[in-house]
Structures are given as structure tokens and as C-alpha cells.
Amino acid sequence: MEGLDSRDQVEPYRGAEILIPEAAVSRDKEEYFWHELIGLKVYLETGRYLGTVKEILETAANDIYVVREGREEFLIPAIHDVVKTIDLENGKMIISEVEGLLDLNEV
């Protein structure tokens, strides 16, 4: 909102949702909005399909992609060692199978 110069003018908007055009936000080449990642199909570099990004968990260290397919769920750390390619145009994410990564997700 333009033209608000004092606390008194802003107070009625406390707690309001702020919306800005996506084009007004600058970001680096390898940065993504969460809404762009939700729904991506996730594959290992070997071609094995793991599932779809259903939600993203925010942690102190890094985000975690929750990938589900049927009853299977994988928690994938959003780090460069694991996430190799994010292809928004084709709706997919390619990850590397770091040793033990998928084993941690088995019940």
C-alpha cells in the first residue's frame, strides 16, 4: 500500500495478508517459490519415479520436500548434494540417491 506514513495509518491493516505480483520479486536462478515446487514429479537420476512433492517443511537447516506416491513417503532435503535438477517446464525434479537417503524413509 502506497502513501502510509505513520503507525496510525497502518494500524487498520495489522494482520492483513500482503500480496505482490510475482514479477516484482527478484530471485536468483536457483531459487523457487514453494507453489512452483508443489506438484513436481520426483525421479532419481537412475530414472526411478519416487512420487510427487506434496508439501514442504521448513526447518532451521534447510527445507524438506515431502514426496508421496500411494502409501510411500520420502523426506528429501532441499540441498544441492541431493537435488540435482528442477525442471519447472516439464514438471519434474531429479535427485541423486545419496547413500542411505531412501533407507531413512522406510518404515
Image (cartoon, helix red, strand yellow):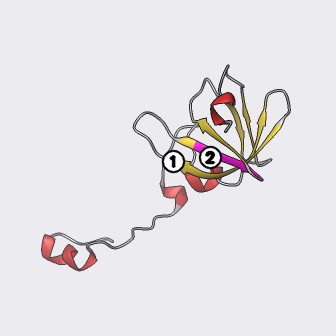
Q: Is residue 66 magenta?
A: yes
Query: Callout 1: helix, strand or loop?
Result: strand
**What is the x, y in percent for residue 25?**
48, 52
Count of marks, rendered view: 2
Kind of residue at disc 1: Leu
Residue drawn at x 19%, y 75% as measured from the top left: 11
Query: Callout 2: helix, strand or loop?
Result: strand
Residue 75: give its label: none
- In contact (CB < 8 Å): disc 2 and disc 1: yes
Left or right: residue 105 versus residue 34 is right
Front residue (pair 51, 94): 51
**What is the x, y in percent for residue 4?**
23, 72
Q: What residue is disc 1 on? A: 57
Determine crowd level at label 2: few under 14, some 14-19, many 20+ residues with C-alpha closer than 10 A.
some
Main SS of residues in magenta: strand
**What is the x, y in percent for residue 27?**
51, 43
Kind of residue at disc 2: Val
Task: First in sequence, mark 2 or 1: give its number.
Answer: 1
Q: What residue is disc 2 on? A: 66
Quadrant in the picture for residue 50: top right
The quadrant the C terminus occupies is: top right
Please report the bounds of the magenta region as a residue range. 65-69
Left or right: residue 5 versus residue 13 is left
